Image (cartoon, rainbow, N blue to C red):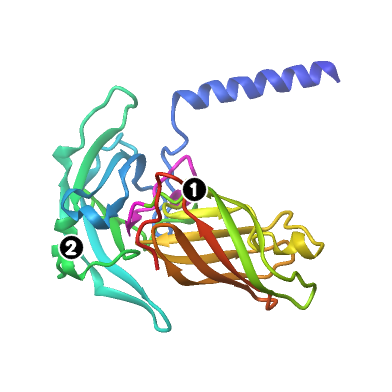
Amino acid sequence: MKMLKYSFGLFLSALVFFSSCRDFVEPNVPYSEFDTGAYLRTIARTSTTFNFFDLQNSSFALTLEAVDIEDGGTVENVEIRVRHRRLIPGVGLEYTPAEDVLVRTLDKSEFQPNSESRFLRVTFEIPALDAIQAVGLTPADIEGADVFEFRLVLNDRFGRSFSTDNVTTNVAGAPFYASPFQYNVSVICPSDLGGTYEFEQSNMESIYGSCAGTITGTTTWTPVSSTPGAYTVTDGTFGFWDCYGDSWGSGNVRISDACGTLSMSGADKYGASYSMTVVSADADNLVFQWLNSDGETGLVTVKSNDGKPWPQLR
């Protein structure tokens, strides 16, 4: 038995060694319409957001690697297409224009050798103003939380095209391939609300317990690294549950800052969802009413810290 395990270990080690010498993608790159093909591996996402307050200097920038049976040599060009997306409350998504439009074409000559792999690579940058103009809008039309959908179309010298319409889930989403062909660039407003704050809460109501008068405490807002402008809060009830005998525990509620507009989302350990309504806001005090889907609520005043007044919030 020990000899069998030893032999299998040697076989596995050899397989890993030989596999590391040559990528698994040859000669079969799985597409929905082709047995062999090409894809664009994402090497670096240099810039994937537009700053609402500085559109002039914002851009969408990537470094891509062309992977095919000729180490990128079959690529003829890559179209970079774009459209604008906005969520209209109560209506749904609005696209401008209805279909994406060409904003730039990368020629095969722009794909060059590199010192890190055998595949050809390209680095490009699309200024935000170019994207805005391409979709028929002006900077004055742009709002925080808008999204620009950039879609890539790889055309090879055999007349084939590879994009979101024929890429398989494996190629688009697996870390090895890292080739989604579409990149969503959000319009964000830089936010700096992270920190620990003192609060007061009153007007608390619940069918599960009561807490008369006013309670005080501290709340910590921790930035969510993957979602700019989002902050997890230590307790979505701001001490209310502790006051009437429950505990927050494993709840996951966050406050999001979308260009000064605050919202609350997430759920507590029982699955109840959370929302908020800002009552007033000035440099010293942020006042809001939180509410969960179980009907529990409270009026919270969060005090700013010394030297860090609240920005304009609503």
Confirm whether residue 290 shows in the render: yes
Establish if 112 lies above or below 239. Answer: above
* Rendering quarter of residue 25: top left
Label 1 packing within 10 angstroms: few (<14), some (14-19), many (20+): many
Place of residue 73 in the rendered image (x, y in percent of width and height, measured from the top left) = 24, 37
Magenta residues (range): 171-190
* Rendering quarter of residue 283: bottom left
Q: Quadrant of the C terminus?
A: bottom left
Asked if disc 2 and disc 1 are in contact, CB closer than 8 Å, the reply is: no
Place of residue 176 in the rendered image (x, y in percent of width and height, measured from the top left) = 47, 39
| Nearer to us in this view, 242 or 84 | 242
Task: Inspect the image, locate mark 1, and give the three-letter code of the amino acid beneath it.
Answer: Pro
| Nearer to us in this view, 244 or 20 | 244
Which circle marks residue 132 in the picture? 2
Residue 173 covered by magenta stretch: yes
Residue 180 covered by magenta stretch: yes
**Residue in the picture at 38% in, 52% down:** 191
Residue sticking out furthest to the bottom = 91
